[in-house]
Image: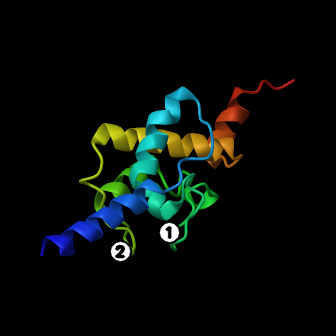
Amino acid sequence: MLKRIFWPVLLTGFLSACTPGPTKQVPDDYKAGQNYFHRVCSNCHGPDAMGGKTKAPKLIDAEFLPPDFTDDDIRDTIINGSTSGKMPSQRASFSDEEITEIIKYLRYSQKAAGIVSEQDVEEEDDGEEDS
């Protein structure tokens, strides 16, 4: 009986230790979110949120920008799972503060990839002075 439990647990631990780490460097303000993301989310969404080996979407994509996909939408999806049922709830995996850090990391990663929301463009336009 003990062997039936021991070997699957050992194999699971070994395989999770082989999961690749994040490949991109991020500023210190976003490292916590990157680490939280990598701990759980990267198993499906890939180490840098660019999609993985499953059908989980890449999150560094215009589809996941505000106003269509807000920070509250990200938070709700992490806590409750996706409305399609393809992503399970991760409520037990993260605290509210950790979810906030993940959102900050994802938004930074989107901007770093050159993917900006209409709101960001409007804010930049509002900041420019007319000649």
Tell me the tag on residue 56. Answer: 1
Residue 97, by quadrant, is: top left
Q: Quadrant of the N terminus?
A: bottom left
* Residue at the image position 29 percent from the left and 61 percent from the top: 80
Label 2 packing within 10 angstroms: few (<14), some (14-19), many (20+): few
Per the model, the C-alpha gap separating discs 1 and 2 is 12 Å
**Circle 2: element type:** loop
Q: Amino acid at mark 1?
A: Ala
* Residue at the image position 41 percent from the left and 44 percent from the top: 36
Tell me the tag on residue 107. Answer: none
**Pick the front one: 47 or 78:** 47
User: Residue 55, how many percent across, how many down?
Assistant: 52, 74
Front: mark 1 or 2: 1
Label 1 packing within 10 angstroms: few (<14), some (14-19), many (20+): some
User: Residue 72, how many percent across, how many down?
Assistant: 39, 49
Answer left or right for 42 relative to 79.
right
Tell me the tag on residue 85. Answer: 2
